[in-house]
Image: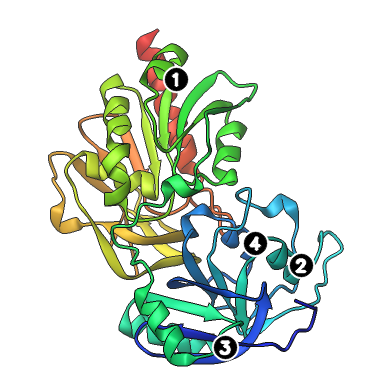
Amino acid sequence: MSLYSRDKAIIALSDGTVEHGYAIGKKGTTGGELCFNTSMVGYQEIFTDPSYYGQLMMMTYPHIGNYGTMSRDDEARRVMIAGLIVRSFSWEHSNSQADGNLQQYLERNEVVGITGIDTRKLVRHIRSKGVMNAVISSDELDEERLVQKARDWDDMVGLELATEVTRDEPQTVHSDGPFKVAAFDYGIKQSIIDNFVKRGCTLRIFPAKGDFREELEQWNPDGFFFSNGPGDPDATAKYALDIVDYAKETGKPIFGICLGHQLMALSEGISTKKMFVGHRGANHPVKNLDTGLVEITTQNHGFAVDEEALDESRVDITHKNLNDGTIEGLRFKNFPGISVQYHPEASPGPHDSRYLFNQFMDMIKEGKKEMA
């Protein structure tokens, strides 16, 4: 697609809502669950976050693309969103450090998108009606057919997607520090890896699915980490809980973020639930119930741990969302484990919650002392 293209495009929602705009990125048709992100910056990090795999991303901030793209901002090896919806797309960028413009980046990654959409109107619609599937198309403009395609698209409930974004084989990321962490990649972000390495951890990163017990026993990690990732946690749990249970049996510290947090809860018999809209953005207030302090957090999840299924003999709630009261953090009583629903690595976003990596490191240090 040429720069400054005025090719027509349509977004059609499964409830029959249709909006017209102009094509950006690759010309074609794409679909998925329609979600929105309230971040003002960091669009490239959002687009490459594996937790967004299979979703259409609608940015609430109107101007997207104005500072171009830089390879160092990628959170994964490729763009993960299924499609992009924006109000005002910037074909040109103003940033001397940029590698190129966003249009070239989207074309290179074969991302279909649409601009010229009243995103505020569409966000209000989603907030009142709930999350739903949609289709974006710039090569087919029949409204009725596109609405039907949206209705036929696979629902996120019951969908297993972690194996679509994980690595193919174990990989070691070295640091100069003395600590070893076994990390399980359900869609791990590069900034999470960077936060561990910065704290002296050598990571052995394992694919989402497989029997790695023998290798883990030989490598003998000091702790375990379960990452963020896309899809329904119940579907991922069908294979992931075996390794979560193994980690618990070792008695070593465990840390989980987002999907990892949900898997740790599921391993203790605490169910998860699909949210009406979900949390996605870099400005969500969370209260730390231990300190009483409020953290401004980066979030990206459409499922949450169900508070009604909570077992107080197994977990304590450590963090709560101040917008809707949902669970944002847990401390586990039957094994040394902590988990959070939000993203303490915060890329993009504020750095209020990076202390959680330090908290996990303190648990590892304490565990090494006890074993010495």
Q: Choose the circle earlier in sequence order: 2 or 4.
A: 4
Q: How many other residues sit within 10 Å of disc 1, few (<14), some (14-19) or many (≥20)?
A: many
Type of the residue with mark 3 = Ile
- Judging by the rendered image, the residue that carries numbered circle 4 is 44
3 vs 33, left or right, is right
Secondary structure beneath label 4: helix
Which of pointers 2 and 4 indicates the residue nearer the eye? 2
- Judging by the rendered image, the residue that carries numbered circle 2 is 104
Query: Gap between marks 2 and 4, in whole Å?
Result: 13 Å
Residue at 20%, 31% (x, y): give it. Answer: 334
Query: Gap between marks 3 and 4, in whole Å?
Result: 20 Å
Residue at 41%, 83% (x, y): give it. Answer: 13
Which of pointers 1 and 2 indicates the residue nearer the eye? 2
Which residue is nearer to you in this view: 368 or 204? 204
Q: Choose the circle earlier in sequence order: 1 or 3.
A: 3
In the image, which disc is placed on residue 117?
3
Residue 199 seen from this side: yes
Query: Gap between marks 1 and 3, in whole Å?
Result: 49 Å
Which of pointers 3 and 2 indicates the residue nearer the eye? 2
Residue at 44%, 28% (x, y): give it. Answer: 362
10 vs 368, left or right, is right
Type of the residue with mark 4 = Gln
Type of the residue with mark 2 = Gln
In the image, which disc is placed on residue 182?
none
Q: Quadrant of the C terminus?
A: top left
- Judging by the rendered image, the residue that carries numbered circle 1 is 221
Secondary structure beneath label 1: loop
Query: Gap between marks 3 and 2, in whole Å?
Result: 21 Å
Q: How many other residues sit within 10 Å of disc 4, few (<14), some (14-19) or many (≥20)?
A: many
Q: Choose the circle earlier in sequence order: 1 or 4.
A: 4
Type of the residue with mark 1 = Pro
Position of 59 relative to 363 (above/below): below
